[in-house]
Image (cartoon, rainbow, N blue to C red):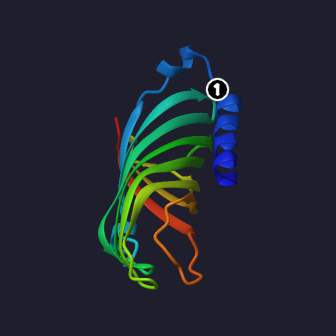
Amino acid sequence: MRQLIVASTFILLCKLTFAQSDSNLSSPIKKWSIEVELVQPFIPTVEILTIQATRNLFIKGSQKGEFVLGAYIRPNVTHDVVEKIDEYMLYTAYRHYFWKGLHIEAGMNTGYYWGKKNLVDGKDYEGLALFWESNIGYKLNLGKTKRFFVNPQFGFLGTMGIADIGPRQGKPDNFVQGNLLIGVNF
């Protein structure tokens, strides 16, 4: 519960601090982007597929705000706490750029999971999942048109106490993560 309050407060502060008038919404040349994660789908026991759309909320000088909406897909993956896990979540986030492509991002994954045969007690677990996520990164637009981009990020992902896959044998449910997003602006 504490993590939910902290994450919600952070997002609210970002929104209040960097909120802009409606006249700034039409200023960006490219308002939308689509991005996919390149690394996590190929890491054993992680295998998370991520696709996201972003929408510019405002641009004012070197400051820029984006809304992020995405899908977090983890189908039938061999796991270190349960034999197999399925997770399907909706990701919503706010990404704030401070200087050129340097940004922070705060978001939430909300969805449902199925954990098959916990490695300690042999039980199946399923239920609602709620995770917080925070990242820092640098979006590098490519070429003269800046249509394509690479966005490496580093951050943390953790449960907000709603995602019990059973006994963990001391294994954490908060994780350091890295993302390598590629995408297209339009």
Q: Position of residue 120 (x, y in %)?
A: 46, 85
- Specify the farthest residue to the left: 76
Viewer-nearest residue: 76 or 137: 76
Q: Position of residue 129 (x, y in %)?
A: 46, 56
Residue that numbered label 1 is attached to = 19
> What residue is rendered at 64% in x and 42% in y?
8
Q: Position of residue 31 (x, y in %)?
A: 42, 30
Residue 32: quarter of image: top left
Please indicate, yes or no, whether residue 39 appears anywhere in the rendered image. no
Viewer-nearest residue: 24 or 40: 40
> What residue is rendered at 42% in x and 84% in y?
119
Q: Position of residue 133 (x, y in %)?
A: 56, 55
Element type at mark 1: loop
> What residue is rendered at 60% in x and 42% in y?
97
Q: Is residue 30 left or right of residue 7?
A: left
Viewer-nearest residue: 139 or 70: 70
Please indicate, yes or no, whether residue 170 appears anywhere in the rendered image. yes
Viewer-nearest residue: 87 or 116: 116
- Specify the farthest residue to the top: 23
> What residue is rendered at 52% in x and 43% in y?
93
Residue 118: quarter of image: bottom left
- Number of on-image labels: 1
Q: Is residue 39 left or right of residue 24?
A: left
Mark 1: amino acid: Ala
**As displayed, is residue 79 above or below residue 162?**
below
Residue 95: quarter of image: top right
Q: Quadrant of the C terminus?
A: top left
Determine crowd level at label 1: few under 14, some 14-19, many 20+ residues with C-alpha closer than 10 A.
few
**As displayed, is residue 131 above or below residue 48?**
above
